[in-house]
Image (tube, helix red, strand yellow):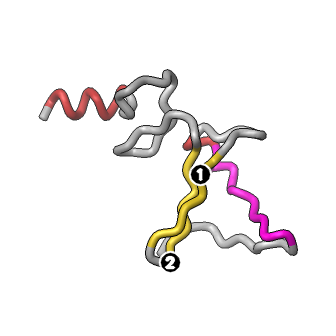
Amino acid sequence: MSGIERSVDDLGRIVLPIKYRKRLGICSNDKVIVDVDRGVITISPMKGVCALCGEAIQSESRVRLCRACIDKVKKS
């Protein structure tokens, strides 16, 4: 397993590393979804994120793919 180790404080909070926040476009006061599946906690931004690569999507559309992934799908 790769990743960054973080401690949980007395209130159950953790700090999300800046490199992950930047990659997903998560800013201060943004809402996220916290979920648990088979013992794994996932944190996902509420705003648009590409369903394939996880990169932030500029516009909120019904297609949840970034421009790069759309181009890859079109080529295949």
Residue 15 is one of the magenta-drawn residues: yes
Which residue occupies the extreme left position in the image?
A: 76
Which residue occupies the extreme right position in the image?
A: 10
Which residue position is annotated with label 1?
A: 33
Are dots 2 and 1 in contact, CB under 8 Å? no
| Position of residue 10 in the picture relative to residue 36 (left or right) | right
Q: Residue at x 63, y 48 (%)?
A: 32
What secondary structure is marked by label 2?
A: loop
What secondary structure is marked by label 1?
A: strand
Q: Position of residue 57 (x, y in %)?
A: 48, 30
Q: With respect to residue 70, does 3 lie above or below?
A: below
Density class for disc 1 (Cα within 10 Å; few <14, some 14-19, many ≥20) is few
Q: Which mark is residue 66?
A: none
Residue 70 is one of the magenta-drawn residues: no
Q: Residue at x 58, y 56 (%)?
A: 43
| Position of residue 25 in the picture relative to residue 6 (left or right) | left
- In front of the other: 13 or 75: 13
N-terminal of the pair, mark 2 or mark 1, is: 1
Q: With respect to residue 19, does 13 lie above or below?
A: below
Which residue position is annotated with label 2?
A: 39
